[in-house]
Image (cartoon, rainbow, N blue to C red):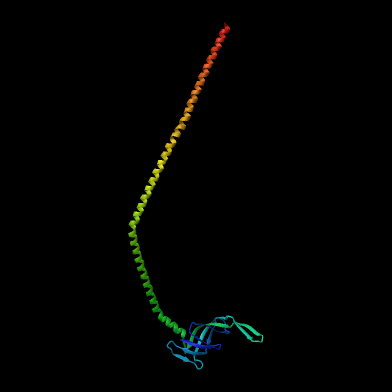
Amino acid sequence: MYAIFATGGKQYKVTVNDLIDVGKLDVPVGETMEFSEVLLVATDDGDAQIGSPYVGDTAVLGQIIEHGKDKKIIVFKSKRRKGYKRKLGHRQQYTRLRITDVMHAGASLAEEEVEEVEAVAPETTEEVETQEQEEMELETEEETIISEEEVEEVEAVAPEATEEIETQEQEEMELETEEESIVSEEEVEEVEAVAPEATEEVEAPEQEEVESKEEAEEESMVSEETEESEDIEKEVEVTENGA
């Protein structure tokens, strides 16, 4: 159902919940205004009632949303060979309405639409619920299929993966043993290479000590011999002097 009404010298075709801009109205924002100059009313069945000039017992209700100004337009005038030029700007003021209801012969279009929505709502809700259930079932079936495929893939891949892991572990163990053996051989070679030097270093100080002892003994023997020879010489001298 729709209606055509007039305001501000213009005609507007509207239905419930339409948003339209009309000429500036001196009504505060939020107020509801009634337009009784309805020129035509038509139903969804195609029946139309034309007024002469207006349809009786009919009105359009609209709520004031806001007041504003339209985009600027330039008005330019000029006359040839007269030196006359004139440039003006203009912004048309408007009032924005939301159509809340169309009343005709005591009936309300808004109430009829609400009743239709309420009558259709259960069917739509049932359809929505059935669609949601079907979607959920499809999702669960897809998830089960995917999980089964993943399990099969894992089972098919598992032996190969275990074999690869075992071979890798064996290779790592062999590498570790080889590295340990190489390290031990190198340590043995280093010890063998260092051992003679160490023994020589140990023997050298021992020989030096022995030699020093022998020298000391020889020196002591020489000193004793010299002392004995000196004593003998002294005795000889004493005997000679006594004689």
Q: Residue at x 37, y 50 (%)?
A: 171
Q: Name the one closer to the observer, 218 or 90.
A: 218
Residue at the image point whose x is 38% and y is 77% from the top = 127
Front position in the image: 109 or 4: 4
Q: Residue furthest bottom?
A: 52
Which of the pair 20/105 is nearer the observer?
Answer: 20
Vertical order, 239 against 138 (above or below): above
Q: How many marks?
A: 0
Q: Residue furthest top?
A: 243
| Residue placed furthest toward the right | 83
Residue at 34 percent of width and 56 percent of height: 160
Residue 79 picture quarter:
bottom right
Q: Quadrant of the N terminus?
A: bottom left
Q: Is residue 63 above or below residue 50?
A: above
Task: Name which quarter of the figure residue 239 lies in.
Answer: top right
Question: Quadrant where the C terminus lies?
Answer: top right
Residue 142 x, y percent position in the rendering: 36, 68
Question: What is the x, y in percent for residue 53?
Answer: 51, 93
Q: Residue 188: x and y, percent?
A: 41, 39
